[in-house]
Image (cartoon, helix red, strand yellow):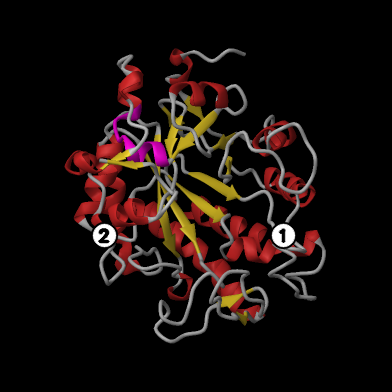
Amino acid sequence: MTITTQNIFEPFTFISGLTVKNRILMAPMTTSSSDANGNVTDEELLYYKRRAESGLGAVITACAHVEPLGIGFPGPFGADSDERIDSLRRLATTIQDGGAKAILQLYHAGRMSNEKLLNGEQPVSASAVPALRPNAETPREMSHEEIKETIKAFGEATRRAIQAGFDGVEIHGANTYLIQQFFSPHSNTRTDQWGGDVKGRMAFPLAVIESIQQAVAEYADKPFVVEYRISPEEREEPGITMDDTLKFLTAIADQGIDYVHVSVGRFFGGSIRVEDSRSRVEVIQQHIGTRVPVIGVGGLQTLSDVKEALEVTPLVSLGHALIMDPDWLSKVQKSRDEEIHQAIYLSKKDQLDIPENLWNMVTNAPGWFRVEE
């Protein structure tokens, strides 16, 4: 099927019954701009408002930790306490008032944290195996009771999202955080029910999905989507393989998830482990796309990029593109796509409504964004 600009603006209805007005979502991106108590700040609200108003179908927020030990970076906002509901409500309302559906991403950092962020507490994970990165701290292996409490915490965070008025939650099972750590044979060396073979390693993420779905069944009184974000492979040895991921996605489909969001750096990038002419997103779409909608992401900046991607998956999410140009979609809709910015222009800072901490990150990290005067 050849995708036209008109196709981009066709509505899409998820399994739960929630309808988004078009095929473009905002990808979840860390802002590191919340206050010291884990509440969303005004500059974050402005950042989300500006992008929602451009016409997006949905905005997936930055990840919110479900437990205090789940913090993975400075300046996060939380969903770990009922005290956060008012903050979350402001965020959901801001996005929805801008015309987009509001989806809260939930996560736990696991071993991708440190004692400084956790006020002296040791990070936790599936096993006491440090990440393969400089200065990584060795986490403490979680007990069975702690695992059950964390599973419950994801359900409780979902309840808070519902009470705050969100339209759904996205489970962050990607980017090396705790849920992925349980699925990975590198970070999970357990021999109990939470580890072992691929079936044992998927027990924790499947239990998280079940906990969240139970919260939705109990508390939601309108369509509420539950989604899963996944990184399909790891470079670590041993690490997650595409074969592992396809088995896991079959199990996810059996649980009735609303969509799978494939987290890769390049939408059209192939496997890092095996020879395959297809992109990893395409492999996943072919495997479960008839059962579960797939959202692709990764390096999509131009209108032609998005059209090509939508020939593979029914929806796409944009990350960097919406930081560089919050009006990306409105320009496309007005046939002004040649005006889309494909760099961070320092001279246009006041026009982009980017929180100060995020601005400092994107303009000072070599090679992350194209930065021009």
Which element carries disc 1, helix, strand or loop?
loop
Residue behind mark 1: 202
Report whether 249 appears left or right of 166.
right
In the rendered image, residue 4 lying in the magenta stretch gets the answer no
Q: Where's residue 203, x and y in %?
A: 71, 62
Q: From which residue to which does the magenta span run?
A: 320-328
Looking at the image, is mark 1 or mark 2 earlier in the sequence?
2
Judged from this view, the residue extending furthest toward the right is 197
Comparing 101 with 217, the one in front is: 101
Hey, which quadrant is residue 159 in on the image?
A: bottom left
In this view, 241 is above or below 13: below
Q: Where's residue 336, x and y in %?
A: 31, 17
Mark 1, mark 2: which one is toward the viewer?
1
> How dense is the environment of label 2, judged by Cα within 10 Å: few (below 14), some, or many (20 and up)?
some
What's the residue at 56%, 52% (across, down)?
Answer: 213
Amino acid on which disc 2 is placed = Asp
Report whether 251 appears left or right of 130.
right
> How dense is the environment of label 1, judged by Cα within 10 Å: few (below 14), some, or many (20 and up)?
many
Residue behind mark 2: 86
What's the residue at 66%, 57% (across, down)?
Answer: 206
Q: Are marks 1 and 2 in contact (CB under 8 Å)?
A: no
Q: Where's residue 46, x and y in %?
A: 22, 46
* Dominant secondary-structure state across the stretch colored magenta: helix
In this view, 359 is above or below 225: below
Amino acid on which disc 1 is placed = Met
